[in-house]
Image: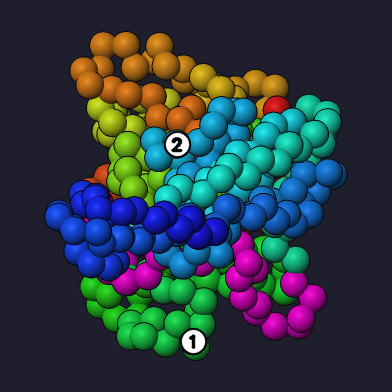
Amino acid sequence: MREWIKLRGRCILGLVILFMGGCGSGGGSTSTSITQAAAPTVTTAAALNGAVVVSLASATSGATIYYTVDGSTPTTSSQIYEAPFLVASNLTVNAMATASGDSNSSVTSQAFAPNIPSGTLVWSDEFSNTTGANAQPNPAVWTYDTGAGGWGNDELEDYCGWNSSVSPCTTSTPNVYVGTDGYLHIVAEQPSAGVYTSARIKSEGLFSFQYGRIEFSAEVPEAQGFWPAAWLMGNNIVTADWPACGEMDVLERIDAAGTPDWNEGSIHGTGFTGGNLGTVYDFPSGQTAAGWHAYGMIWSKGSVSYYVDNPAAPYVTYTPSSLSGLGGAAWPFDSGQSNFIIINLAVGGSWPGSPNSSTPFPAEMLVDYVRIYTN
């Protein structure tokens, strides 16, 4: 949209001005054009049982889209759209676009009323594969972190993406694929002494969700130096950075099996980035993380709970009051952002330490499914 303004005999500070006859004395005239950013469009793709995945876009090149899902009018302090997000509850998406040199767009509003019952499966990746060969994880959902550098934890591996042949990655021994067995395989390899490869798969920029119950069916390798994890981070990591974006660790453990064996569920944010808010779940006698288990998180407004195998029996629930006594801590999980999913198998690092002669290579983390249910 263009708005044309005709000005006579005046100088306007802060506008791009076309001078006709100049400013100051005299009878000149001034014209300027202000372009309004194109209002966002809302498109949807079917998920499961009435849920949809919502995408926002603006026809204005380079526009930033701000949006809300609580019915409020978006401003430049609202969440920035970074990725498609799941809508599985009754809500209204309001969005506006901004672009340098343009006025803000009008607000686009779209209401959703799927009326989905609690406990309904609304999204999943079952890692199905009927191709007869190892297959790429769904590229509409999954991308990869790649390379070395320790990843903030002094990890030792190079992460490799699907079909990566950049040394030390190789297609002859892939680190991530969907097998003909219907499992996601994340494989840790040792191609040479002191060199390790593995994979970190994520839905960043492709798929995200806010609130609901997410469950990972997985079995993990247990040996010195292994650090398997399934976790989530806020889409706003792009603008707010870590830890302000928030982190929720659903499956996480290190090293060889313990007695009892265990998993830890943690949350992290500004002011609580270490072991402040982590709780260990002890498996029943005779069970280990090397067997198949369902690792789950129930995320509601003001609450994050974790469970293993039984969603009716969370072993820990965190709320904003859990931050009491932690100086400068801020609860990041109800700021409006959706979260993306990460699954990885790290090798070495500041928590598990390095592999040793007892550590087997190759070693696999297997995932049968990732599912999201309504609360």
Q: CA distance from mark 2 to mark 1?
A: 47 Å
Q: Residue at x 31, y 54 (%)?
A: 8
Between 62 and 221, the residue placed more toward the observer is 62
Q: Which residue is mark 2?
A: 75
Q: Give the quarter of the figure containing the C terminus.
A: top right
Task: Residue type at mark 1: give it.
Answer: Thr
Q: What secondary structure prevails in the magenta region?
A: loop
Any magenta on residue 138?
yes
Quadrant where the N terminus sits is: bottom right
The residue tagged 1 is: 171
**Which quarter of the figure has residue 345?**
bottom left
Residue at position x 41%, y 54% in the image: 5
Residue at disc 1, secondary structure: loop
Asked if disc 2 and disc 1 are in contact, CB closer than 8 Å, the reply is no
Residue 70 pos. (x, y %): 59, 28
Is residue 122 shown to the viewer in this render?
yes
Q: Is residue 211 left or right of residue 347?
A: right
Mark earlier in primary sequence (2, 1): 2
Q: Residues within 10 Å of mark 2 (few under 14, many from 20)?
A: some
x, y percentage for residue 88? 73, 38
Left or right: residue 253 compared with residue 137: left
Tell whether 245 sits left or right of 284: left
Q: Position of residue 279 (x, y in %)?
A: 42, 26
Whether 19 is drawn above or below 81: the answer is below
Q: Amino acid at mark 2?
A: Thr
Q: Nearer the viewer, residue 29 or 301?
A: 29
**Residue span colored magenta:** 129-157
Task: From the viewer's side, name the closer residue of 187 and 336.
Answer: 336
Q: Which of labels 2 and 1 is toward the front?
A: 2
